Image (cartoon, grey):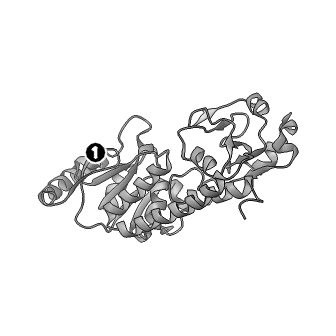
Amino acid sequence: MKNRNLLALLLIILMYALAACNSSQPTIKDREGNDVILPKKIERIVSTAPSNTEILAALGLGDKIVGADKYSKDVEGINPDITFFDMMNPDAETIINLNPDIIIASGINKLSGNDPFSLLKESGISVVYIPISDSIQGIYEDISFIGEVTGTKDKADKIIEYMKNEIDKYKKIGEGITKRKKVYFEISPAPNLYTFGKGSFMQEILEIVGADNVFADKGKGIAISSEAVLEANPEVILTNVNYIENPVEELKNRDGWDSIAAVASDEVFYIDANSSSRPTQNIIKALKEIAHAVYPDIYE
């Protein structure tokens, strides 16, 4: 009860203290369309998803991150001694004690149906939401928005320009491939197989490098059966599963999968999990790994 009273008091103090200075501060719409009053100066940032943390680090703001979700621990460029918290259940009191100027939040934080930062927003802390982007264009817009909010727009523009140049290079090669390979990309292993299709940035990447996703007509995150993979008979299998021991060998040794063309020809490859699952500038790493795995003689 004492902690709850302390939290309530802190919120009231913050609300009145910040209300006096917010009137002259710029108001913007975040990536979800919410009106947000920005702080005059950003020195202390809380990031609530690894994708946002990766973008902030790339913008040279890693030293300003004072708190982040636990999945951000592996992001290069941030202080490993900062406070980490549960992405799906962030503790409001912990975040208030970090005294952030702004919280870069994610649509992932709302998957439970509630806004975990509503109380903090009411207290006057600036909270901007980045949606779960499922397209490359969406990733560009995320990077541009975070750059604009944090005063690093020039760096953001350079990152986007680099991404576009790299994608254009691979796209030109991909468009010239006449004998396209059939690919299956696994994002969850047996017994609960999951893959992706249309409506995902990973589907776009496969198209860019000139590969045909055998489940392209499915949704952006769908469960499939082992029988469906056997029937599709992909020529190349890719996996970004990183939480079981040797995912490539596990996949190749499944009952009946030795009849799949990709397994028979040993065309099964691991793709970096973070770069192929987080909507950030690092998808370029995934694109390159996929291109070289599927067409090693074409992408040199």
Is any part of residue 82 visible from this angle?
no
The residue lying toward the viewer, choosing from 165 and 229, is: 165
| Quadrant housing residue 65 | bottom left
Give the camera-side residue of 142 and 126. Answer: 142
Q: Position of residue 172 (x, y in %)?
A: 61, 57
The three-letter amino acid code for the residue at tag 1 is: Asn
Residue 186, position in %: x, y?
69, 42
In the image, residue 158 above or below residue 48: below
What residue sits 72% from the left and 29% below the top? 225
User: Does residue 165 appear in the picture of this structure?
Assistant: yes
Residue under the point 19% across and 50% down: 12
Say which element carries label 1: loop
How many C-alpha atoms fall within 10 Å of the one at disc 1: few (<14), some, or many (≥20)? Answer: few
Q: Quadrant of the N terminus?
A: top left
Q: Position of residue 231 (x, y in %)?
A: 78, 30
Question: Along the line of sight, which residue is nearer the eye, 35 or 135?
Answer: 135
Is 116 above or below relative to 289? above
Pointer 1: what residue? 34
Q: Tell me which residue sits at (31%, 56%) in the image.
A: 96
- The residue positioned 34% from the left and 65% from the top of the image is 44
Task: Count up the numbered dots.
Answer: 1
Q: Nearer the viewer, residue 212 or 95?
A: 212
Placement of the C terminus among the 4 image quadrants: bottom right
Q: Position of residue 178 (x, y in %)?
A: 72, 48
Residue 143 to residue 266: above or below: below
